[in-house]
Image (cartoon, rainbow, N blue to C red):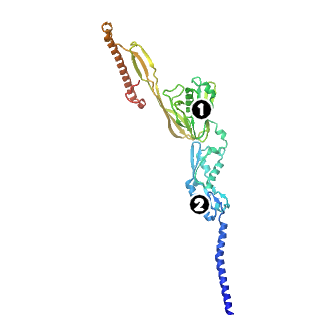
């Protein structure tokens, strides 16, 4: 009897011990599992670009902080306004990671809570003309903060012109004008009637020949094309457009000003091409008023001012090349080729900021038109000694020899004249600062 009670008591003690041990062990594990599940994020929960699904708040904060460090090191934000660009310092943005994690919604994409006060300051530094009256500054600030709140690493570019409140007024500014006097140039009337406005697209190249083909104007005369090309070249010079291809003639045409010529020729694949690097489009507008053709460049105004000026302009007198002809009398002289002065000039462009301060000076072009040497044909001056042989009847052969000698003398005189002319030309060239424009020393011009 006593043994049975002892066994029962022993079993009860074992069961109680096992119960207490199991409860303390598995109960704690169950409690931890339940509590951790309530503190972790559901599947599909993001903070910025960071997936925090199944992570606790402390783990999520650590992961977001690591991504923020990468974002600050790898992200750049640039603000563009016309010709000017400035970088926004991403370190000027404040990130509240703890508040973001604590208020994150389960199973959704959450953005970081960010703030900054530097956008307005930076815009004022970019240009004083960027005001709240003309530009949506609040939207610019919102766009920058939206980028920061996502923690997406890349380079971002903002064009301030995209936030302009009244875009129509900004796109109709007259940048420059060129006027052609139709009474003084040979401009195709039929071509002028068909002439339409040219569009210059943003961040793209403009080809005059391609534009004329698109408008069905490719059959115009070469001179008309060249007049148009020279006018457009002069039109865009006081801008920041980049000239990619330009040609000039051997001699300065009457319709062009020195330094402002542009020549095109479809058959010789000679085009006039320039680049509009700006964010806004421009238009070349044509308007006939009385006997003038006014060509205007219309589009968004520039932030900087561009001024064009000529420098180092020089003229070069032509040389005279003498050719002798025995068929002419000694006093006879005729001009075979009329001489023309050579011309040289450099075109420079100065850039000033909106405060009027000079930023830079750059050489745009260097044009040289070589002189056209005058060619004169003169008669021979006969020798008195050789002329006495004309009375001899028996010296027919001698006459032939004298005639041949005279011709030889003429050739020799011509050669000597050319060498003397070239020698004089060489002396003049060597005394000139721009002797490199004449070619090789002792060169004989023909």
Residue 347: give x, y in percent of width and height: 50, 33
Quarter placement of the C terminus = top left
Among the two numbered marks 1 and 2 on one chain, the one whose residue lies closer to the N terminus: 2
User: In front here: 373 or 28?
Assistant: 28
Which label belongs to residue 213?
1
**Disc 2 marks which residue?**
65
**Figure quadrant of residue 172:** top right
Residue 198: give x, y in percent of width and height: 61, 34
- Left or right, 166 with reference to 441: right
Give the number of marks: 2
| SS at mark 2 in the image | helix
Position of residue 88 relative to residue 263, above or below, is below
Residue 21: give x, y in percent of width and height: 64, 79
**Figure quadrant of residue 321:** top left
Residue 32 visible somewhere in the drawing: yes
Position of residue 420 relative to residue 402, above or below, is below
Which label belongs to residue 241?
none
Quarter placement of the N terminus = bottom right
User: In front here: 19 or 154?
Assistant: 19
Q: Residue at x 66, y 41 (%)?
A: 167
């Amino acid at each position: 009897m006593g043994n049975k009670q002892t066994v029962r008591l022993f079993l009860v003690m074992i069961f109680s011990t096992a119960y207490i041990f199991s409860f303390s062990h598995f109960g704690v594990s169950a409690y931890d599992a339940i509590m951790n599940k309530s503190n972790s994020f559901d599947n599909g929960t993001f903070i910025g670009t960071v997936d925090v699904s199944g992570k606790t708040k402390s783990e999520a904060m650590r992961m977001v902080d690591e991504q923020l460090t990468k974002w600050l090191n790898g992200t750049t934000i640039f603000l563009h306004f016309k010709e000017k660009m400035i970088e926004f310092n991403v370190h000027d943005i404040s990130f509240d990671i703890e508040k973001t994690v604590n208020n994150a919604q389960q199973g959704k994409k959450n953005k970081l809570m960010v703030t900054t006060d530097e956008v307005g300051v930076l815009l004022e530094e970019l240009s004083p003309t960027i005001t709240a009256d003309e530009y949506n500054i609040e939207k610019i600030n919102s766009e920058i903060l939206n980028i920061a709140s996502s923690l997406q690493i890349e380079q971002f570019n903002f064009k301030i012109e995209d936030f302009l409140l009244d875009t129509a007024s900004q796109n109709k500014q007259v940048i420059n004008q060129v006027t052609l006097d139709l009474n003084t140039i040979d401009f195709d009337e039929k071509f002028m009637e068909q002439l339409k406005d040219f569009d210059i697209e943003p961040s793209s190249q403009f080809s005059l020949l391609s534009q004329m083909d698109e408008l069905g104007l490719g059959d115009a005369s070469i001179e008309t094309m060249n007049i148009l090309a020279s006018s457009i070249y002069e039109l865009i010079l006081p801008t920041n457009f980049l000239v990619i291809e330009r040609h000039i003639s051997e001699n300065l045409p009457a319709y062009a000003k020195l330094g402002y010529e542009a020549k095109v020729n479809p058959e010789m694949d000679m085009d006039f091409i320039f680049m509009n690097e700006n964010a806004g489009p421009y238009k070349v507008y044509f308007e006939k008023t009385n006997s003038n053709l006014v060509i205007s460049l219309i589009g968004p105004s520039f932030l900087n001012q561009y001024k064009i000026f000529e420098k180092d302009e020089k003229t070069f007198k032509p040389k005279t090349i003498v050719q002798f002809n025995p068929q002419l009398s000694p006093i006879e002289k005729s001009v075979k080729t009329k001489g023309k002065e050579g011309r040289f000039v450099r075109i420079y462009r100065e850039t000033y900021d909106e405060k009027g301060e000079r930023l830079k000076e750059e050489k745009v072009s260097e044009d040289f038109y070589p002189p056209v040497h005058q060619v004169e044909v003169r008669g021979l001056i006969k020798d008195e000694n050789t002329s006495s042989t004309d009375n001899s009847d028996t010296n027919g052969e001698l006459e032939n020899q004298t005639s041949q000698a005279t011709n030889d003398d003429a050739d020799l005189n011509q050669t000597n004249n050319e060498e003397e002319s070239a020698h004089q030309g060489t002396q003049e060239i060597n005394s000139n600062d721009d002797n490199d424009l004449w070619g090789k020393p002792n060169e004989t011009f023909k």
